[in-house]
Image (spheres, rainbow, N blue to C red):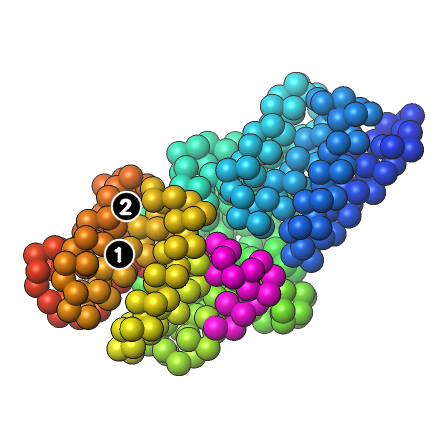
Amino acid sequence: MTTPDVMTTNHRRAPTDRAVALHAEAQRRLAQGNAKGAGSAARRALALFRRHEGRFHPDVAATLLELGSALEMSDHWPQARRCYQRADAVLQRYSRLRHPDIRRLRVKVARHLCGVCRTLGGYAEGDRHGRLAVRLAERFFGARDLDLAGALNDLGMLRKYQGRYRDALPLYRRALKIVNTRGLGSSSEAASLYHNLGGIEHARGRYAAALGPAKRAVRMRTRLLGARHPQVAADVAALAAVLEGLGQSAEAAHSYRRALALFRAAFGGKSYEVGVNLAGLASVSRAVGRLAAAERHYRESLAILRRIFGDRHVEVAITRNDLALVLDARGRGSEARRMARLALTSFRDSVGLRHPHTLAATRALAPVLDRNRLAGVSRVNRAR
C-alpha cells in the first residue's frame, strides 16, 4: 500500500501513480479541514482510478471514502452517503477476499455509513452499519484494533442520538481503553472520546461530570492541532454546552462565539456547525433574558438547518422547539403556537413519538399550546 487506504499493483502506470498522489493529497487536505481542496483532489483521483483500474477496483472504493468525507465537510450529506454506498457496492465484490487492506476498507465504509446516516437522522440504517463495523473490526483485527475503537465510538454517538444514553457510555469507555492500551492516550482519537464522554454526561444532565472530559478534549486537541482547527472548534462548542448547563452563562457565550468564529472561518457562515452553534448561543441569550437576541440567533440557525436538512430533521425540530418558547416568552402567542406545532411535527417525523427529545418537547410546549405562560425556562438537551 502506498497510502493507508489505497491498494497498489505490481504493474502500476504513470496515471495510477498520479491517482495515488492525488488520493494522498485529499487525505492531507481533509486533515487540514480544507473541504474544497480535498474534494477536488479526490475527484481527480477517482477519475484516474476508474479510467485505468476499472470502476470496481478497491482503489475506487477508497477514494470514494475521501470524496464522501469532503462532501460531509461541505454539508452535502446525501451526496456523501451516496459515495459511501457506491464504495460499499464495490467492496461487496470482494467480500470473500481475505486481503487485510480490503477488510480494512470494509470496516471503514461501514463506519462512514453509520456516521452519515446518524447525521441525516436515519438511525435504524446507521445502527445496522455501526454494528456491522464493530463486528467486522473485531473479527478481522481483534479486540485491540484502533478501527474497532473508532467503530465503538461511532456506535456510541449513534446511541446518544437515539436517546439510549446508558448504552453509549460503555461503548465510549471500551474504545478509550483500546486507545490507551495502544499508547495513544494523548492522541486525537483519545480527544474525540473525551469529547463524547463529556457529551453523553451532558445529555444525561450530569453537567459537573461532563466538565472534566470536555475541558480535557479542548486541551488535548489544541495541543495536537493548534487553536484554530475546526476540530478544536467542535470541542470548544461541546464545552460551551456543558458550561451553559452549569449556569456559567458568560463563559458559555464566550465559548460559543469562539467556536462560531472558527467554524465560519473554516466552512463559511451557512454551515451545519454554524447553524447548531448559533442555536447554542441563542440558548444562552435566552437563559439570561436577552430574548430579542435569542430569537434572532434561533431564526438564523433555523434557516441554515432547514436549507441543509429540510423540515423532517431532529436539529430543525429542536430549533423550532426553542424558538417557540422564546416567542411565547415575548408575548407572541399566535406565532409561538404555530412554531410549537411545527416543532412537534418535526420531532415525530424525525425521531418518533417515544424519543427523549419528543417527550421533552411535548412537555415543554404544552403550556404554549394551552396559551399559558411558562413558569420557567425549559429546553431540549442539545449536547453535541
State which quadrant residue 360 falls in.
bottom left
**256 drawn magenta:** no
State which quadrant residue 364 falls in.
bottom left
| Kind of residue sitting beneath label 1 | Asn
Quadrant assignment for the C terminus:
bottom left
Q: Describe residue 272's horizontal placement relative to residue 62 as left or right.
A: left
Quadrant assignment for the N terminus:
top right
Residue placed under numbered mark 1 in the picture:
321
Cα–Cα span, label 1 and label 2: 9 Å
Q: Residue 334: percent from the left, percent from the top? A: 14, 58
Can residue 216 be seen from the camera position used here? no
Residue contact at pointers 1 and 2, CB within 8 angstroms: yes
Q: Earlier in the sequence, mark 1 or mark 2?
A: 1
- Per the image, label 2 sits on a secondary structure element best described as helix
Q: Residue 152: percent from the left, percent from the top? A: 52, 44
Q: Residue 173: percent from the left, percent from the top? A: 49, 53
Q: Describe residue 352's horizontal placement relative to residue 232 as left or right.
A: left
In the image, 213 versus 356, the foreground residue is 356
The residue drawn where x is 68% and y is 21% is 94
Q: Is residue 240 above or below residue 61?
A: below
| Kind of residue sitting beneath label 2 | Phe
The residue drawn where x is 45% and y is 47% is 308
Q: Is residue 292 above or below residue 148?
A: below
Residue placed under numbered mark 2 in the picture:
347
**Classed neighbour count for the residue bearing mark 2: other residues with Cα under 10 Å, few (<14), some (14–19), many (≥20):** many
| Magenta range | 257-274
Can residue 314 be seen from the camera position used here? yes
